[in-house]
Amino acid sequence: MPAALRSRLGPAALLLGAVAAGLAVRFLPGVPPLLAKVAGVALWSVAAYACVLLARPRARVLSASLIALGLSFGIELAQLTPYPAALSARHLLLRLLLGTTFSAWDLPAYAAGVLGAALLHHALLRPAEP
């Protein structure tokens, strides 16, 4: 297997896992709405972190964290304008990707998701203990 493909398998698995978990928590019955909201937002930023690693597999943890957090915060802050809501009205996938309304409570959830992804990334980079 080519090294370029092998280096992207982990981030691809993380992306798929984050998207699946985010959709499950969002759409499964019985999940309290607040939990679904916070978990979905945090998992969105985990997916953003995975996308950073897909694009740059050798990115350092700090760099990937800052890019993913900047992307997450940027999309949230863009919701202060009418454009994400207008695009989100066109399709469910755009609504899940861009959101519709700004919530300051989402910012700490994004940070928690990026922190979790960064800790996982750091743990996987550490050499195995003998």
Image (cartoon, helix red, strand yellow):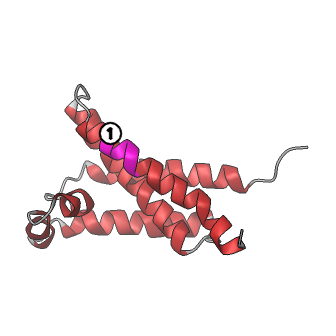
Q: What is the quadrant of the N terminus in the image?
A: bottom right
Relative to residue 94, is residue 37 depicted above or below?
above
Relative to residue 8, is residue 18 depicted above or below?
above
Residue shown at 51% from the left, 53% from the top: 14
Residue shown at 45% from the left, 53% from the top: 16
In this image, 49 relative to 88: left or right?
Answer: right
Residue shown at 22% from the left, 60% from the top: 93
x and y percent of residue 30 in the render? 23, 25
Residue 120 visible: yes
x and y percent of residue 27 in the render? 24, 39
Q: How many marks?
A: 1
Give the prevailing secondary structure in the magenta stretch: helix
Q: Is residue 64 magenta?
A: no
Residue shown at 20% from the left, 64% from the top: 94
Provide the residue designation for mark 1: 24
**Mark 1 residue type:** Ala
x and y percent of residue 17 in the render? 46, 48
Q: What is the quadrant of the C terminus in the image?
A: top right
In this image, 45 relative to 95: left or right?
Answer: right
Q: Is residue 23 magenta?
A: yes
Dot 1 falls on a residue whose secondary structure is helix
Neighbor class of circle 1 (other Cα within 10 Å; few <14, some 14-19, many 20+) is some
Residue 108 visible: no
In this image, 72 relative to 61: left or right?
Answer: left
Relative to residue 53, is residue 21 depicted above or below?
above
x and y percent of residue 43 in the render? 39, 49
Which region of the structure is painted magenta? 19-24
Relative to residue 86, is residue 126 depicted above or below?
above
Q: Quadrant of residue 86?
A: bottom left
